[in-house]
């Protein structure tokens, strides 16, 4: 059933109590889809995320001739790879607003031995950085033509393979570009030695390297006076286990872990592991600095808060920047100012997240100082009955829904509305249903 737009957020009238099963990780699902497509044996992906972003990846791989069997009721996707060969001689691929799909598919098509492929997305996706990846692929022999500004989508790729060897990449604007290059590098004619031209946020790159290792290709890293380098051998992917299980999405778990700071109580997050492939689990641990009590037993995080007011923090979110909106949105409820740094690159994501967050918090009467790479939020009494713009960005919708769960008026009536709540389908289609179920279990 379509969500009301704008959607009033029903506050929690009692402390949170219950568990939330969050869907699989988007980052892992889309990486494993690519790696499975490069295998020469079928791979069953269990716990896969079914969302707009992963759906675009599945559809694009299908257009490239890869046979894929998704089963949403069982959260499984079976991929029948061709060992790096793309059966389709030509294809038009729509990546929407999915950065992972855009970058991963660009690298995949560039690594193909034959074929002609066109890749395009939404107008906002056409503004997101691709130049570092395109330049690196071109230096390895790829034939890529940008149709509307060099370094941006839409593009046309003529598949003629990659030669390997030394290559430098600037992936400072998005680590997805480096991940894309690493995953297709084994298709090259010889070992690929990747030099990082600038600093890259490490957690997602480390995730990529660990996943490649599970699929039979190991990378080696080194750092010296020439900088950081990653060597990727020429080789073939093969997954030897019966199935691959995707972890629950740590970013999605973060919304519900933060909820007790808003309305008290405790929330259990089964399956969310402390030892995780995902760097965003660090956000859940960071919430302890704001006063949240965290325990982790038998593969379940339990987030609990019994105080009157949490504390503001001063921290860099550079390595887990997808989560900064969650903390910024609840900062008005915390004691003392909150300073969030390391987020300048978030201006180039689904929206300008730094400017958008500053704008929406000011609308709520907050004192916000916006700089290129940071936000400082000084809590002020909240204004009531506000409507939050989401800029088509799922993380605005979910973050402010957490804030709106506070019973600000003391009568259980909504005071905050969210525009375009359906944008959550990008990574968490059932977010508002999960929030409703937790609210109901808390009131029981």
Image (spheres, rainbow, N blue to C red):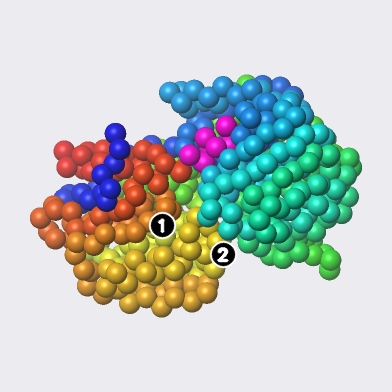
Closer to viewer: mark 2 or mark 1? 1
Check if mark 2's residue and mark 1's residue have beta carbons within 8 Å.
no
Q: Is residue 117 above or below residue 76?
A: below
SS assignment at label 2: helix
* Mark 1, other Cα within 10 Å: few <14 / some 14–19 / many ≥20: some
- Residue hosting label 2: 345
Percent position of residue 264, x then y? 25, 54
Local crowd size for mark 2, using a 10 Å CA cut-off: few (<14), some (14–19), many (≥20): some
Main structural element of the magenta stretch: helix, strand or loop? helix
* Residue 55 in picture, x, y percent from top left: 52, 35
14 vs 110, left or right, is: left
Residue at the (23%, 62%) spot, across then down:
386
The image quadrant that residue 89 belongs to is top right
Classify the position of the C terminus by image quarter.
top left
Front one among 261 and 234: 234
Kindly tell me whether residue 287 is visible in this rendering.
no
Query: The N terminus lies in which quarter of the figure?
Result: top left
In the figure, 375 relative to 72: above or below? below
- Asked whether residue 274 is drawn in magenta, I would say no
Q: Nearer the viewer, residue 370 or 249?
A: 370
- Tell me which numbered mark, 2 or 1, is placed earlier along the sequence: 2
**Residue at the disc numbered 1:** 391
Q: CA distance from mark 2 to mark 1?
A: 17 Å
Is residue 75 visible from the viewing direction of this image? yes
Q: Which residues are magenta?
A: 52-59
Residue placed at 68% from the left, 41% from the top? 118
- Name which residue lies at 30% across and 38% down: 2
Residue 172: horizontal and vertical position, in percent? 66, 62
Residue at the spot x=68%, y=34% of the render?
Answer: 91
């Amino acid at each position: 059933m379509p969500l009301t737009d704008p959607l009033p957020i029903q506050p929690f009238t009692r402390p949170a109590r219950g568990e939330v099963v969050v869907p699989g990780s988007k980052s892992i699902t889309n990486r494993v889809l690519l790696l499975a497509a490069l295998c020469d044996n079928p791979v069953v992906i269990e716990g896969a995320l079914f969302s707009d972003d992963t759906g675009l990846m599945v559809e694009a791989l299908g257009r490239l001739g890869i046979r894929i069997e998704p089963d949403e009721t069982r959260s499984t996707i079976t991929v029948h790879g061709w060992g790096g060969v793309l059966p389709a001689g030509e294809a038009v691929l729509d990546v929407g607003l999915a950065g992972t799909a855009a970058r991963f598919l660009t690298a995949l098509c560039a690594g193909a031995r034959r074929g002609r492929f066109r890749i395009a997305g939404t107008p906002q996706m056409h503004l997101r950085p691709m130049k570092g990846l395109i330049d690196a692929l071109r230096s390895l022999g790829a034939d890529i033509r940008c149709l509307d500004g060099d370094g941006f989508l839409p593009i046309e790729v003529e598949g003629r393979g990659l030669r390997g060897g030394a290559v430098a990449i600037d992936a400072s604007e998005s680590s997805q570009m480096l991940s894309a290059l690493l995953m297709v590098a084994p298709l090259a004619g010889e070992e690929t030695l990747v030099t990082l031209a600038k600093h890259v946020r490490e957690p997602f790159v480390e995730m990529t390297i660990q996943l490649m290792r599970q699929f039979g290709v190991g990378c080696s890293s080194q750092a010296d006076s020439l900088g950081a380098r990653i060597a990727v051998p020429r080789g073939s992917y093969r997954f030897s286990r019966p199935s691959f299980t995707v972890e629950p999405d740590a970013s999605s778990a973060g919304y519900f872990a933060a909820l007790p700071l808003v309305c008290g109580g405790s929330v259990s997050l089964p399956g969310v592991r402390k030892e995780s492939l995902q760097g965003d689990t660090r956000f859940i641990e960071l919430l302890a600095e704001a006063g949240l009590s965290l325990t982790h037993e038998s593969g379940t995080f339990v987030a609990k808060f019994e105080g009157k007011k949490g504390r503001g923090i001063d921290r860099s979110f550079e390595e887990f920047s997808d989560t900064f909106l969650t903390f910024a949105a609840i900062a008005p409820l915390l004691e003392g100012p909150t300073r969030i740094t390391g987020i300048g690159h978030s201006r180039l994501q689904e929206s300008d997240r730094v400017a958008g967050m500053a704008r929406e918090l000011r609308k709520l009467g907050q004192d916000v100082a916006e700089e290129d790479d940071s936000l400082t939020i000084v809590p002020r009494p909240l204004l009531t009955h506000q409507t939050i713009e989401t800029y088509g960005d799922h993380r605005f919708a979910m973050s402010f829904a957490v804030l709106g769960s506070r019973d600000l008026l003391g009568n259980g009536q909504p005071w905050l509305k969210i525009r375009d709540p359906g944008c959550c389908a990008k990574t968490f289609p059932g977010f508002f249903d999960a929030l409703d179920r937790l609210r109901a279990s808390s009131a029981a």
